[in-house]
Structures are given as structure tokens and as C-alpha cells.
């Protein structure tokens, strides 16, 4: 995908995340730059819910703006360090989602209980516990180390970091993170959750993991993205409530 296409996808992703109450005045969604493994595309320092195509810059892993205009988000090291540590990652989100903040402070681990998340997050999401914003590469490296090979982590009292193969999958992963957090919270109100055993969780890994690879994975993510796009542009409302 060319740079303009990636920026369009980032704008759409930000709209969807705002509609889902995952981002608001703060947070940032990025993508690995096309044909540049040492750069990424991210909006300038502004509300991600309000971005347009003109609000994005290309940055290198040292924090230099190499294309575009505007002052970058101060927590750009989250993105730079995750991309540098994870060649498989094509999209990164940092949000201050309320549910991620709740679980980042909870004595109970946020574990995977829903379908594909059952295997991915079965042992519980890792938590970055240090106080303060992630404004330098040293802290960014610690965030990337906490994330490891996973797709999501929590920042204690702060929010989350979600990473996946491209922007669409990262957006969808963030939505499933919120859904998983909400469902587990509701289940705990009824008592001890019926968690999947590691062996049971593997039963979700093959069918979900197989679908999430390559062209099939892109098609699945784009299918979900199309639904959420219809929500934000009003098409779904018009279909459900025709004139």
C-alpha cells in the first residue's frame, strides 16, 4: 500500500476508534512506513479523533520528522521501539481506553476469554508498571520488552499498547481488547470465571490463527473494518432506518 493509502486507512482507523470510545483527545495510531523499515507514519500532536489526511508525518526511529509538517506526539517512542523490536508489526495503537485503565490497576489479570483472544491472552496481559509518560527511547524499549511477542499490553494507570500486522488488524484487535475486558468484568460480577485451560485455549488457536494469516487474515480484518466504517459514516444507520 502506498503512503496516501496508509494515511487514509489511519484516518479511518482513528474515526472508528473514536466512535468506539477507545481514543478521544489523546492517544495515537500509527503504521509502518511503506518501503522504509526504519520509519513510521503517525499523526501530529493533536486529538486523533479529529485527524485528516494532512495531519500525518513520517518519523524515523530516532524521532526525526522526515516528511510532513507538524510537531509529533511526545510519546512517539512507543511506536518507534515496537516497530524496531517487531519486524512483524505494521500497526501500533496507544490509547487511554477506560477499560484498559481499569484492568491495568486491577488485582485481577485481564485474560483472554473470547474466541481468538482465548489463546492469545490466556495467561493474562502483561503490564508496564513504571510511572510517567513514554517520552524517550529507554522507556520505549521497556514498553516493547513488556509487549514481547504479544499483541497487547497494559500501562498501569495509563492505558494500553496494541500491535498487529497492519492498521486494520490493529484497530480490530483494540476493539476486541475492549470487548474482552467488558465481558470479563461482567462475568466477575457473577463469581469466578470459567477460564479456558491452556489446552482448551489451543482449540481456538488453530481456527482463528489460520484465518488471521496472509490474504485470509487481511480479508477478515477488512470485513470488520467495513462494518465499523459503515457505523461512522452513517451508512449502517441509513440501512437500518431507510427514509
Image: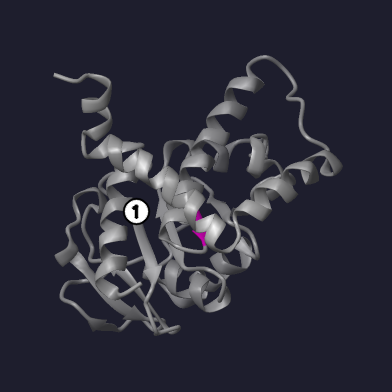
Work out which quarter of the rendered image holds the N terminus and state it. Answer: bottom left
Q: Residues within 10 Å of mark 1 (few under 14, many from 20)?
A: many
Q: Residue at position x 28%, y 52% from top?
A: 12
Q: Is residue 71 something one can see in this rendering? A: yes
Residue in view at x 65 percent, y 64 percent: 149
Left or right of residue 114, residue 229 in this image = left
- Say above or below: 46 vs 139: above
Q: How is the image coloured?
A: one colour
Q: Is residue 42 above or below residue 223?
A: below
Q: Residue at x 77, y 25 (%)?
A: 194
Judging depth in this view, the residue of 108 and 79 nearest the camera is 79
In the depicted structure, whether residue 134 falls above or below residue 118? below
Q: Tag 1's secondary structure?
A: loop
Task: Tell how many labels.
Answer: 1
Q: Where is residue 65? Give x, y as percent.
A: 26, 81
Q: Which residues are magenta?
A: 160-164
Residue 186 at what x, y percent from top left?
58, 21
Residue assigned mark 1: 27
Q: Position of residue 56 (x, y in %)?
A: 23, 68
Q: Is residue 47 left or right of residue 91?
A: left
Taking depth in this image into account, of 164 and 108 the one nearest to the observer is 164
Q: Nearer the viewer, residue 123 or 91?
A: 91
Q: Is residue 158 visible?
A: no
Our reading of the magenta stretch's main secondary structure is strand
Q: In the displayed orientation, state which residue is furthest to the right.
A: 199
Instruction: Work out which residue is located at the far top of the displayed protein and give it.
Output: 190
Instruction: From the top left corner, tell me how far across and down residue 159 is, in percent.
Output: 46, 48
Residue drawn at x 46%, y 47% is: 172
Location of residue 29 (image quadrant): bottom left
Q: Quadrant of residue 61?
A: bottom left
Amino acid at each position: 500500500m502506498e503512503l496516501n493509502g496508509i494515511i487514509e486507512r489511519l484516518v479511518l482507523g482513528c474515526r472508528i476508534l473514536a466512535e468506539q470510545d477507545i481514543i478521544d483527545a489523546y492517544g495515537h495510531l500509527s503504521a509502518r512506513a511503506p518501503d522504509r523499515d526504519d520509519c513510521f507514519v503517525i499523526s501530529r500532536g493533536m486529538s486523533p479523533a479529529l485527524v485528516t489526511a494532512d495531519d500525518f508525518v513520517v518519523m524515523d526511529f530516532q524521532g526525526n520528522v522526515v516528511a510532513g509538517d507538524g510537531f509529533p506526539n511526545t510519546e512517539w517512542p512507543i511506536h518507534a521501539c515496537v516497530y524496531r523490536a517487531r519486524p512483524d508489526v505494521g500497526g501500533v495503537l496507544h490509547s487511554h481506553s477506560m477499560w484498559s485503565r481499569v484492568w491495568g490497576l486491577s488485582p485481577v489479570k485481564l485474560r483472554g476469554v473470547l474466541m481468538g483472544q482465548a489463546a492469545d491472552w490466556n495467561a493474562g496481559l502483561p503490564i508496564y508498571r513504571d510511572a510517567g509518560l513514554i517520552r524517550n527511547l529507554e522507556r520505549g524499549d521497556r514498553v516493547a520488552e513488556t509487549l514481547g511477542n504479544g499483541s497487547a499490553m497494559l500501562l498501569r494507570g495509563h492505558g494500553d499498547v496494541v500491535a498487529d500486522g497492519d492498521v486494520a488488524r490493529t484497530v480490530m484487535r483494540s476493539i476486541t481488547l475492549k470487548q474482552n475486558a467488558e465481558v470479563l468484568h461482567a462475568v466477575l460480577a457473577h463469581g469466578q470465571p470459567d477460564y479456558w485451560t491452556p489446552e482448551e485455549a489451543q482449540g481456538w488457536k488453530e481456527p482463528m490463527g489460520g484465518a488471521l494469516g496472509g490474504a485470509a487474515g487481511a480479508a477478515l480484518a477488512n470485513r470488520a473494518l467495513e462494518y465499523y466504517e459503515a457505523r461512522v459514516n452513517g451508512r449502517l444507520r441509513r440501512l437500518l432506518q431507510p427514509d
